[in-house]
Amino acid sequence: MKKIYYLLIVSALALISSCQKPEYVEPTVERQGITSLTAYFTSGKYVDQAMVKLEITDPDQDVFVIPVPWFFPEESTDPTTIYMSNLRIRAELAPNCKIEPALTILDLNLENKFTYTNAQGESREIIITGKRTKSAKCNLMSFALTEPYRVDGFINDDTNEIYLFTTDDLNGFSAEATACAHATVETTLSVKKDYNNDQQVTVIAQDGTTKKTYTIQKRYPNKIPYGFRSASVRQLFNFEPVSRLGFPEYTTTVYPSLASIGGNIIVCLGNGETPVYLDGLTGVKMGEINLGSVAPGSVTSDEGGNLIITNHVEGQGTFEIYKTKSVTAAPELFHSFVNESTVPMGYHVKVHGNIDTDAIITITHEGIAGVTETSVYTRVVVSGGAVVSTDTIDLAGLGLSWGAAPTNTAKVVPASANVEDGIILCYYSYNTIVYVNGNGAISATFPVLDEGVSGNYNTNVMEAKTYNNAKYAIHLVSSHFPMWGCGPQLRVFDISTPTSIKDGATVMQNTSIEWYQTAASGCAAADVIMAPSTDGFKVYIYYFDHNAGVIGGYVADCIDI
């Protein structure tokens, strides 16, 4: 089996009866007694969420200044002044260490005095206070030449370089750049320059002191021959979507689906509301997409920059597939057909390939809660940009069947844009990834229970895409019971030889998706999407676990550096 790449995996310990984080943990250093202090909101829409965590490495430290961010969320303009006097502070302590009196709600404008006793019984006075701190982040999020035409730059933060991938003459170009939240771009980019030669752009952090200078180079890099570089994987964002984006509470039943085009993430909740789009680098909400006349059941995207929007229908209803290349352009009808089955369809749609050329679209039919399960999906084959076949396929003969949306329906995904490569699926509570080959037979299975996944998880969320000659399958394991320490897990498999999925994935150690909803079980609905960039140098993975209360994204590249 070709090497399997992993973005991340949660390896979470079950919590004992309480939904709170454990107060005492093993120290990171033998003498280290206090390893961290975390400040939590006690009021407002972020109540019980962590605002900031101070990591502590000095065992002899007596004064602890918690660096409260100037704004929260970081990308907002909402000052944290009003929270400074009313923050709950929690400490991570080594065994047999204690702080007296017990930490509760503190005013971080003051110097709060406590007695700290280490494991040897030695005591000393410590002070816990806080200070609002302006951000020292000074990264560029995007860079592009804009006049006389657009050339997007590739930002390499490891080397502080920006690559312009072209052989064109770049003399006399103006540019634009976007910095991270509250940082500013020092260089005047509107002035036309000769980008055939190296240029520079400087970013100044919000603190006014920290700077980073990027060198802009015209070049055409080599790609590694296969897939993405595991060393290039980095997280873009990971946060709680109810307070940040106004999404429904975890107890609300929704049917989430994701897509990504033009640097945006599109989120459809399947509840009749217009899908919204977020900035693909920051997760900031930008607005609602232009739906035209579509009644949205779900969204997805292909490898050609197309946003696919579908409706949701019951049995015998007319199913419609729309497409657009912009969140602001009304979609046009691509294909429609009658759902000849007796069960609904439209909440789970996946595409492998490019519908402008060759692709396969799969629509998983849903069981009806309390009435029937189903084993049916519809496969739409696209060749030369046109639909050449629409077939409804029943997997009952393989012993496969699933329940109702949103939590128990499978997500059947095409293993490639070639019918002969078959499909991959997984669902609750079968909890086994199944590869069905092009002849309709099961060729490989991978029981995710062997990876520490129990009935506390929902295993029905999958995706598959091709990137830089590699075919990938992505499996998002969402959580039924996040309050029990069951957090979301994300695995990426190499399925260029699809039967190799039986060999499974090895955990990427000490890496996890942080989740934010730990109150009770809600609606365990989720989705995951993989989206290659238009220039082919980057690939993005976005995930949304509604019940665990988290939305996030990762990026990787295939540049040979």
Image (tube, rainbow, N blue to C red):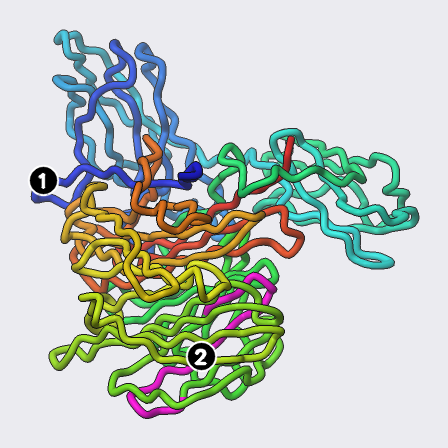
Q: Is residue 49 above or below residue 334?
A: above
Quadrant for the C terminus, please.
Answer: top right
> What SS does tag 1 mark?
loop
| Residue 221 relative to residue 515: left or right | right
Q: Mark 1 or mark 2: name the one nearer the start of the chain.
A: 1
Picture coordinates of residue 85, whole percent (x, y):
33, 41
Q: Is residue 308 magenta?
A: yes
Q: Position of residue 422 (x, y in %)?
A: 39, 62
Left or right of 469, for residue 368: left
* Residue 357, quarter of the rendered image: bottom right
Residue at the image position 53 percent from the left and 80 percent from the top: 388
Q: Amino acid at mark 1?
A: Ile
Task: Decide: is 225 above or below 151.
Answer: above
Q: Is residue 50 visible?
A: yes
Q: Nearer the viewer, residue 222 or 35?
A: 222
For image coordinates 61% across by 75% down, the residue present is 385
Is residue 442 depicted above or below 467 in this figure? Answer: below
Q: Residue 103 falls in which quadrant of the image?
A: top left
Residue occupied by mark 2: 310
Magenta stretch, residue numbers: 300-318
- The residue that disc 1 covers is 16
**Residue at figure coordinates x 25%, y 37% from the top left:** 11
Q: In the image, is 458 to the left or to the right of 413?
A: left
Q: Is residue 192 visible?
A: no
